Amino acid sequence: MLDQKLVFDALGENGVTFFTGVPDSYLNGFCNYALANCGDRNIIAANEGNAVAIAAGHYFATREIPLVYLQNSGMGNTVNPLASLAEKDVYAVPMLLLIGWRGQGDTEPKHPQHRLQGEITPGLLDVMHIPYTVLTDDAEDFARTVRKAAAYCRETRQPYGLIAPKGVMAAAEKANNVDDVYPMSREEAIEVILDHLPADTVYAATTGRATRELFFLRERRGETKAHDFLNVGSMGHASSVALGIAMARPDRLVTVLDGDSACMMHMGAMTMVSKLDVPNYLHIVLNNGAHESVGGQPSAGHRIDFTKIAEGCGYATVGHAAATKEELIGALDALTGAGRAAFIDVRIHKGLRGKLPPLDFDHRAAIDALMDDLNG
């Protein structure tokens, strides 16, 4: 991994001192250094398009070149603002795009959700006419690249991409940041939910630890995985997949095991229940206030009132977050049979119980098993 102090020194020498984006495990060294040292000049955004727009606003107000950081899986969220806001014939916004290159070559054979994204990462920049450099872990090479990229941004008022392969901007091991703000862990909360909802409940688990913990809890408990949708990619969309299932199968309870960061990434999806009759839809946010699976950087999850937001969108709630096992059980009991879509904000602590193996399963077989269950 590059020495992150040298990285930020090189950026600062070229006038790049404002950072915004969505944390990525391939960039966790960069993200954690920015979090520790950059104060309010580092803004963790709700999604990557949000970050591009914040960066644009910063440039308009200061004429300074900003940097947007993201995992390549989030590039789709940036296409609209990059192609229509930052484009040279519209508002001509320069910025550096620091992109973690998941799925490059055969670096993640057990994670096929990254394979196509890894393959098309350089091509997406090409099709948007954004030049780029693939970074190495050589500090002098990085300094030269930043000088070239910043000069291009100043001269053309256009973005420049910095693609970071595995190991360039991230330590080999991610920190396990544990707190004790709330008593339950995510795994404990999921097990309470499994214990108290009907055995044939369909679950949609969000990207990251929720998918892994549900998967391995099913194995430990000797239960079928045929009721589960594991949203291993497409962060922020598990709730919409679940909504589509709930609409088509009103006879089955469909429960989302969402994350706070994932829910906020596409929070507009919550408004859909105001237009639909889906009393069999239960949306649960496992809220630890962090982007835990990519390094534990803080989200806004513990700063906002998900329950009031959900009520405003048309969900039934118990009026407050559930912060203990007893409160979670009470909320599950109260909202079962509520007559409309229901929502629970489950407050949990940060930190991982221990290392879980990476998910290694046949994705097509898993979805076919769920489809057989839903159509059988």
Image: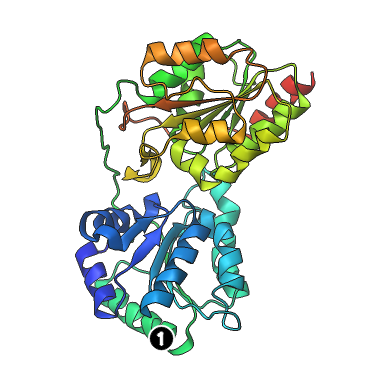
Q: Residues within 10 Å of mark 1 (few under 14, many from 20)?
A: some
Residue 283 % position (x, y): 56, 28
Q: Is residue 162 visible?
A: no
Closest to the observer: 361 or 36?
36
Q: Amino acid at mark 1?
A: Arg
**Colour basis:** rainbow
Closest to the observer: 247 or 14?
247
Q: Which residue corresponds to mark 1?
A: 154
Q: Residue at x 32, y 30 (%)?
A: 352
Residue 116 % position (x, y): 60, 54
Residue 186 % position (x, y): 40, 26
**Quick one: quadrant of the C terminus?**
top right
Closest to the observer: 373 or 363?
373
Residue 253 in the figure: left or right of residue 173? right
Residue 132 % position (x, y): 47, 75
- What element does badge 1 sit on? helix
**Quick one: quadrant of the N terminus?**
bottom left
